[in-house]
Amino acid sequence: MLNIIVCVKAVPDPKEACNIKIDPHTKTLMRCDVPLVVNALDKNAMEAALQLKEQLDVHICVLSMGPPEAGNIVKECLALGADEGFLLCDPAFGGADAYATAFTLARGIEKIGAYDVIMCGMASSDGSTEWVGPEIAAILNIPVVTMVKEIVESDKDRWKVKASLDNGYRLMQVKLPAAFTVTRDLNTPRTLSFSGIIKARKKEITRWAIDDLGVPAEAVGLKGSPTIVSELSSTESKRQAEMIAGPREEKADLLVQKLADLGAL
Amino acid sequence: MENLQGSVWVLAEQIDCQVLAVSFQLIGQARKLADELGTTVETVLLGDHIEEQAKLLIAAGADKVYLGNKTELEFYQPEIYSEMIVNLASERQPAIMLIGSTFMGRELSPLVAARLQTGLTAHCIDLVLDANKILEAKIPAYGGLLSIICPQKRPQMATIAQGVFPQPELDESRTGEIIPLDMPVDIPRRIQTLEVVREATDGVPLESAPVIVAGGAGAGGPEGWRKIVDLARALKAALGSTRPAVDEGWADLETMIGQSGKVVSPELYIGVGLSGEQQHMVGITNARVMVAINNDAKSPVFEQVDYGIVDDCREFVPVLIKKIKEYQEKKVTC
Amino acid sequence: MIDFTFTEEQEMFRKAAREFAETSVAPHVQEMEKTGEVSDEVVKALGTAEMMALTIPEDFGGLGLGYTARMIALEEISRISVATAMMLQVFALGIEPIVQFGSDELKKKYLPGLAKGERLSTTAVTEATGGSDPTGIRTSYKKDGDDFIVNGRKCFITNSHIADTINILTKSEDDPKLFCVFTIDKDLDGWRATHKEHKVGMRGCNTGELAFENLRIPKSQLLGEEGKGLRVSMSAIGDIGRGGMVGCALGLQVACLEESVKFANERILYGKPISALPAIQNKLAEMKIDLEAGRLLAYRATAMQDSGQRSSNEFAVAKYFTCEAAQKAAKMAVDIHGGYGCMEEYAVTRFLRDSFVLGPSAGTSDIMKVIIGRWVLS
């Protein structure tokens, strides 16, 4: 049996991103009004695990660190086909930077216990650092390959994967247990199905707070974050457009003239 | 907490025995920071047959180069590289560590940061020292700039994309130390690079293209996107994109300009059907002239460019292409 | 205290239906508009997504989810394509009489295939001589030993040319007060789909005529009791048919409001988006009010239906309200779009044409008022 833990993040729906605000005191993201969805790239990670489950004997745990509402996205992952869900939820975990997040998730993974593969999207749509996946691997002392765009071989004790490069890839062979962060090129995530939602009724979500993980408060959340936001300042734009107006053909003529004057034609 | 007076490090990267431009650019900026801190610039360079490259790093501004110059280091191996860097950093205690935001940099820097239990900032578009001589990494967010600091842990780490900082002048007369590194013993060897495949690209890479046509969500679909591609072709321009266009599948990730994409500084930038979102616009540094075509007169893009046209790009672009071709034909025949 | 919220699971059903509609139906809408034909890919996708299985009991291969889940699915699918929602709702219209009145044998024969979308169904009542008045139909049956011989024609039947499992309402040749509903399939000789209609709206949903000529039907295919066929067909059309139209109408209302908001925010006149103008805000408010009210009527009726209560009156109210509201919303959406509202590339023109077809389906607004009047005076 291959044990896969997929780490997923509940993020504000990128389609409503304009409504996101910053808390002026802690200078972290305030997520109240915008609905939470599964981070898009984490769906690619889930899909990879689900495809493997269709071919092999695979047990999928989905793990997330987030506010209570993140329970919905864990439930969604169960409805997609994961076997068990875990939510690390505690006010103390809030305001975490990439390192504190990776630390907390790593402790969560250790508490889940058995794992052969950790998978997650290469970046989240909100924080977008790309750090959490590799940092989890470093903390757990397991190898990691980032930006996986194809799983070539998935044997019990080692995998062969293609990792993206600019205009190309590197073919990596990795001994398990290992971590992989994935790109959108890996697959097309399936959509929720009604029967999956019905099957999820019987599946469990375990919630763990700080005491369940047995970690000190200074090691997690804002307190456990090596980096903090010191300031939010506004940028001044140095340009203001001179508008080229008129009927379409005229606008095009004027623009072509401008481009010619600039020597671009 | 006292600010340890360690040096400013740059993790340089080489591909095929050539140090990347971004590494030189970071040494340039590291030099400025080090001078302000009253300390030295040190770099780490790992590879094979790279002695000459090490000298170039000194010419760019490094005082010291820790050089791992062995066959085994020819290609990036995450376990070996991270072990060497972590050991060295634990021993030498740098104050700051800068890494280029390349494929290697983005995988290696978190491995190092996690093992050193320190902070790492991504997508930096500027690095300065604050009043307490702590590194302030500026990243674009929510229409403004966030300043991120790592007040306690060391080293303060940051990744920066190529093109954010200028290329420094090479001064061959500069002197510095090259310190050879030994291979570490007992490294876990759980990852192996079996093959590295690079497909040939045609055309000028975005980062050095003089003219760029970038498209966004306003293309509306693959058909609209094709028209933008045609415009780039008509202008012999490089094609850029925004995240929405990549997410929709119209454009490849390699063409994405912005916070998590490429940083460009063209002579001429034409943004078509994009709204001027910060995540994209921060990727454009020092463009000489910027033009935008957008169907919304109130679009924020018009506050960030020099010339604007309000129109539906799907209708306007074909007319523009026609006019460009007419102009070019006239030029030839005159 | 009345709880007006959906459960977490129902919210997930909505998400699943929305994702399905946006990925599997939306890409085919333009083509369906152009050709007016049913898209085979859409039918296949509906089957794979188990949309036909929602109201089929688990014992027969269905999901046994009930009518609120069905309403949610129809609402979300209609938001993308009213034609597809209509086709789907009529599949259920064909399924329900078998579930409620079919023998175990018939259920085993048809329901598993219907659940997978391998069989497609409909219920055929309307004829040239009677739709609003079903007793006026002329399709007749006469007994011949253990069989029934049927002759006649049906018109305005949704899914006429794609269905292979059809419940037909027939009247006794001998006694005009006796009706029978039979389930016919392609194994029987003597029936075929004839004329295909070209509708002004709901293009992509097939409507047409069926002809029966000396169609011999074994008595095992009878639904419910002999002679009591009106009850069978009316209970199907009453709740399922009306409920289905409500789902179609709600989805269209949502689409009209969303498109109108989008356009109103983008269209600049007098230096501002037109959403700043009171005249536009008024229209948007009306659409919103009708949508809120329609939703409450819809889900109140499905909640009653799910709990086993009689709900055909409540569905009549919901059907009347939402179908009228959808027609109003479509007209307002077109008005908001100004000149663009007449151009085919703008979705609102399709909304307007789709809204026409909502009215006469599963009972006109006037008939709904007859039913509701009766309810009030009873």
Image (cartoon, coloured by chain):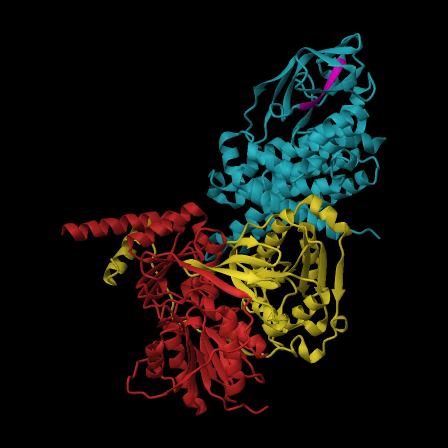
Q: Which quadrant holds residue B125?
A: bottom left
What color is chain A drawn in?
A: yellow
Would residue C340 appear left or right of A62 to someone viewing this image?
Answer: left
User: Residue A243: x and y, percent?
Assistant: 35, 60
User: Residue A144: x and y, percent?
Assistant: 56, 65
Would residue B305 appear left or right of A127 to someone viewing this image?
Answer: left
In terms of secondary structure, what is the magenta stretch mainly? strand
Work out which quarter of the rendered image holds the C terminus of chain A and state it.
bottom left
Would residue A240 appear left or right of C289 to someone viewing this image?
Answer: left
What stretch of residues is rendered in magenta? Answer: C165-171
Would residue B252 appear left or right of C40 to someone viewing this image?
Answer: left
Work out which quarter of the rendered image holds the N terminus of chain A and state it.
bottom right
Q: Is residue C304 magenta?
A: no
What color is chain B drawn in?
A: red
Tell me, yes or no, if residue C287 can be seen here.
no
Most foreground residue, A135 or A234: A135
Q: Which quadrant holds residue B272?
A: bottom left
Q: Which chain is cyan?
A: C
User: Residue B327: x and y, percent?
Assistant: 22, 52
User: Residue C116: x and y, percent?
Assistant: 67, 34
